[in-house]
Image: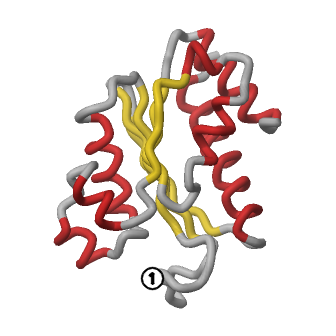
């Protein structure tokens, strides 16, 4: 069952006739699944791909392998490139890419510990990125990232008051 903030975000997307597509690495499809479980899924969810492996990011999303080598697969730069790659072939009004570190064994460092998650979101009307660090186990980190994204998107698409 999706969280209240994901439900609220989906309702706002539907009310504004917006739809969304995801390219997910660290969240392994959970973001699309959470939005897909909302009552508005048929109106808002265009699709999603899981691009956990760097090769999938490079081959399917056309992320330059030099970006992956220089910045690592779990980075703001690669996440932005993945969002742009998704935008090139999946029709939607909003394109979102997510990468990050939910467990040891990736590119973690003192500056980028496990729990660091990157989001990049693009539409014709706005673009934003976010780097946040969450604590907890793998599933907790993923769910916190999804809720963080929903909050951020609500802020971007809420009508001005």
Relative vertical location of residue 38 with respect to residue 14 in this rendering, above or below: below
Residue named by callout 1: 107
Please tell me in which quadrant of the rendered image residue 93 appears: top left
Q: Is 18 on the left-hand or right-hand side of 53?
A: right
**Label 1: few (<14), some or many (≥20) within 10 Å?**
some
Q: Is 24 on the left-hand or right-hand side of 37?
A: left
Please tell me in which quadrant of the rendered image residue 116 appears: bottom right
Q: How is the image coloured?
A: secondary structure
The C terminus - image quarter: top right
| Residue furthest bottom in the image | 110
Task: Identify the residue at image location x=70%, y=46%.
Answer: 147
Q: Position of residue 56 (x, y in %)?
A: 32, 58
Q: Position of residue 140 (x, y in %)?
A: 76, 62
Q: Position of residue 8 (x, y in %)?
A: 74, 26
In front here: 128 or 23?
Answer: 23
Relative vertical location of residue 115 with respect to residue 20 in this rendering, above or below: below
Task: Identify the residue at image location x=82%, y=36%.
Answer: 1
Label tally: 1
Relative vertical location of residue 82 with respect to residue 133 in this rendering, above or below: above
Task: Identify the residue at image location x=48%, y=28%.
Answer: 20
In front here: 129 or 2?
Answer: 2
Relative vertical location of residue 137 with respect to residue 161 in this rendering, above or below: below
Q: Position of residue 49 (x, y in %)?
A: 44, 44
SS label for mark 1: loop
Task: Identify the residue at image location x=70%, y=63%.
Answer: 141
């Amino acid at each position: 069952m999706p969280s209240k903030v994901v439900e609220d975000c989906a309702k706002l997307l539907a009310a504004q006739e917006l739809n969304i597509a995801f390219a997910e690495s660290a969240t392994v499809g959970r973001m699309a699944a959470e939005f897909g479980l909302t009552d508005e899924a048929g109106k808002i969810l265009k699709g999603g791909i899981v691009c956990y492996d760097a090769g999938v990011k490079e081959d399917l999303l056309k992320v330059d392998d030099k970006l992956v080598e220089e910045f690592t697969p779990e980075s703001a730069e690669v996440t932005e490139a993945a969002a742009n790659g998704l935008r090139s072939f999946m029709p939607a009004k909003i394109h979102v890419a997510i990468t990050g570190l939910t467990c040891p064994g990736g590119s973690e460092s003192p500056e980028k510990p496990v729990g660091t998650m990157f989001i990049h979101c693009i539409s014709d009307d706005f673009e934003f990125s976010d780097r946040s660090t969450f604590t907890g186990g793998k599933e907790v980190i993923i769910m916190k990232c999804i809720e963080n994204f929903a909050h951020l998107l609500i802020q971007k698409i809420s009508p001005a008051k």
